[in-house]
Image (cartoon, helix red, strand yellow):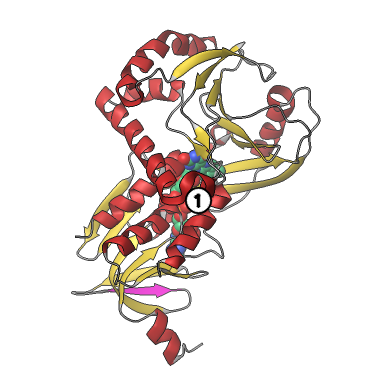
Amino acid sequence: MNLSYWEIKTWLTNIDYTIIGSGIVGLNCALQLKEKFPKANVLILEKGMLPQGASTKNAGFACFGSLSEIIDDLHHHSKTEVLELIKKRIDGLQLLRETLGDKGLNYQNLGSYELFIESDEELYETCVNKQNEINTLLFPIFNSNVFSFKANDFGFSNIKPNYSFNQFEGQIDTGKMMEALLNKAQKVGVKILNNCNVEQFEEDNNSVKIKTNSLEFSTRNLLIATNGFASKLIEQSVKPARAQVLITKPIKDLHIKGTFHLDKGYYYFRNIDNRILLGGGRNLDFKTEETDVFGETEIIQNKLEELLKTTILPNTKFEIDHSWSGIMGVGNQKKAIVKQLSSHVYCGVRLGGMGVAIGSLIGKELADLIE
Ligand SMILES: Cc1cc2nc3c(=O)[nH]c(=O)nc-3n(C[C@H](O)[C@H](O)[C@H](O)COP(=O)(O)OP(=O)(O)OC[C@H]3O[C@@H](n4cnc5c(N)ncnc54)[C@H](O)[C@@H]3O)c2cc1C
């Protein structure tokens, strides 16, 4: 199909910044570029009908780290590095809340809980013993103790009688966040082309030529925000990691409220609209889940259902309504990759499992690479 003169002139000419990917990072990057350079033409190319990676698929935890995760991170990183990671997540969440407002996100500070499975005495003891040390470490950030232990009031089964509580974590409505971000970007004049899969790009002295499944054009600068799909276009150490989720039908008088981590964070669940949303289980089959192809597998979906029956809702009747998956970008480090790759090409990728928290900030850092 030949494009019309109007289509070429209005959408594909004189583009200052082309961003690949309309996830949290791509959209925040676009907003920041428009703020810095109000007259610039900013275009986003998105392969999906909707954003099609992790940003519309996630669990909506507004979190910065559970007790066991922080203890584990201290085995692999220095105290300063761990504090930096946590600070970044908190700053990112703050920026997200400032950008869209708590109402726009349906942000709720219901706290988060870490549950320890009955047989995991070692992890439980470690967390109990190290709680004070971690609270002391985080005190300069929060001016208060972050973690405490609480009795199992929600009636979960097969777990230790006490769970760890984090008073500073909350939850958002992921759909509302992405809808608000898309609206905001379009309001400030960012153009978004959906169903547009970038297949390759080529840089010359002053511009970058982009080839998609449906069109070719040039842009002055290219910013890549494709997270789990990054290695298809650039050589950076990012691997795709699929994460599967399910949601129950509404449950009458659902008593569970908050966000919950179980078994070292391999599983996570929350309340939403009187339902339970539960995800995780990649550890059952890491190899199969190292893919950028969406899909659900029996082994993981069965385990999620079993956990609902035996641990989360042992005395409540429920039905599964729906399952889905999303694709994350992970690597050997938790730090995202934000850098200039060549004269006119930049990337902000590898957000791991905390992109709701850090996505806004990484989008800003990506835009800030441009002077
Ligand atoms: C099931 C699940 C649960 C999660 N839960 C949480 C949570 O509770 N809290 C939290 O903080 N984080 C969570 N995350 C992680 C978080 O969602 C991600 O880190 C974050 O959304 C990443 O944002 P992004 O913009 O970098 O990537 P994405 O949202 O993946 O955006 C990348 C975009 O690029 C597009 N794209 C890729 N290649 C191309 C191409 N060649 N051409 C055009 N477009 C392309 C994709 O379609 C996609 O829309 C979860 C992730 C998943 C999958």
Q: Position of residue 265 (x, y in %)?
A: 52, 28
Magenta span of residues: 208-212
Q: Tell me the element at label 1.
A: loop
Q: Residue 225: x, y in percent?
A: 38, 56
Horizontal side, residue 160 vs residue 164: left or right: right
Residue type of the residue flagged with mark 1: Ser
For residue 367, above or below residue 98: below
Residue 64 locus on image (x, y percent): 42, 32
Query: In this orientation, which residue lies closer to the viewer: 150 or 235?
Result: 150
- Left or right: 253 in relation to 129: right
326 relative to 208, above or below: above
Q: How many marks?
A: 1
Give the residue at mark 1: 55
* Prevailing secondary structure of the magenta residues: strand
Ligand 1 neighbours mark 1 (CB distance < 8 Å): yes
Whether residue 119 appears in this view of the structure is no
Q: Is residue 109 left or right of residue 129?
A: right
Q: Quadrant of the C terminus?
A: bottom left
* Residue occupying the point 21% across, 61% down: 342
Other-residue count near label 1 (Cα within 10 Å), few / some / many at <14 / 14–19 / ≥20: many
